[in-house]
Image (cartoon, rainbow, N blue to C red):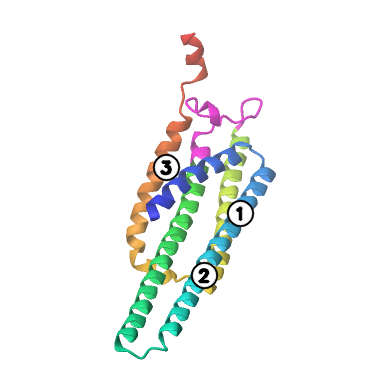
Amino acid sequence: MCLLVGLPTVLIDTQSRIVLLGTQTNSFLVAGTIAMAVAEMCLRAGKAAYVARSIRRRASDLEAKILELSSNTEQSVETSASSLRLEFDLWKRQIISYHTAELTADMYAEYIAIGCSQSIIFWWSGHPFYPALELETGGAMNPGDVAMWRFNQVAMLAFQFVVEIFVDYLCVVVEMAAGIDFARIESRSTFLGVVFMMMAVLNINISSVVYLSAPRERQFEKH
């Protein structure tokens, strides 16, 4: 579940953030980051509400079935009621586990996407083999301009991380209030850390290949 959710999220979110960073406009990047944060909060709140409502609805159906069976005092009926409760508990644990795995993968993926997109822009902008990431400065940049640009990139990286941490904190509080138990995933934190480290490396390689192309001078020479 973590891989099924995490990998597409990493790839799509990385490209979206590269597009935002490629505008080279801080105001546009800030607006885009906040818009993505609001969309993420709404989506996670909606999914948490859906899971909580599904559990409540099934619990109500279970109580109705047990109440219907309670009029009969036979031993088989009591056994049937116990089986229904056990089935409900197993279903509830399963759906909460799946939802927790999805949320955990999504949170890991967001941080990976932020780091990967900023790293690609930071290291490959202006590189002759990455003309799509070329800086639109209208001319050569002096060392002072380059230093200022790199400082701005680090500041934007910090801003995106701060926004994402705030979003995750707020969403986790809401999700825990809705009955989502994150303790179930703690035992797998080491495994997930290794998996998503590998995913980060894979994402960097894929994204770098996407923007890789021959320098324009060599393209003209071929023609």
**Real-space Cα separation, disc 2 to disc 3, in angstroms:** 33 Å
Residue wearing tag 2: 52
Q: Residue 122 colored magenta?
A: yes
Residue wearing tag 3: 203
At which x and y percent is residue 124? 49, 34
In front of the other: 63 or 133: 63
**Real-space Cα separation, disc 2 to disc 1, in angstroms:** 20 Å
Residue 150 sits in quarter: top right
Q: Earlier in the sequence, mark 2 or mark 3?
A: 2
Single out the mark in the foreground, 2 or 3: 2
At which x and y percent is residue 201? 38, 44
Which amino acid, mark 1? Answer: Ala
**Real-space Cα separation, disc 1 to disc 3, in angstroms:** 23 Å
Would residue 113 appear left or right of 93 to someone viewing this image? right
Q: Secondary structure at mark 3?
A: helix
Q: Earlier in the sequence, mark 1 or mark 3?
A: 1
Callouts 2 and 3 close, C-beta under 8 Å: no
The answer to whether residue 158 is above or below residue 78 is: above
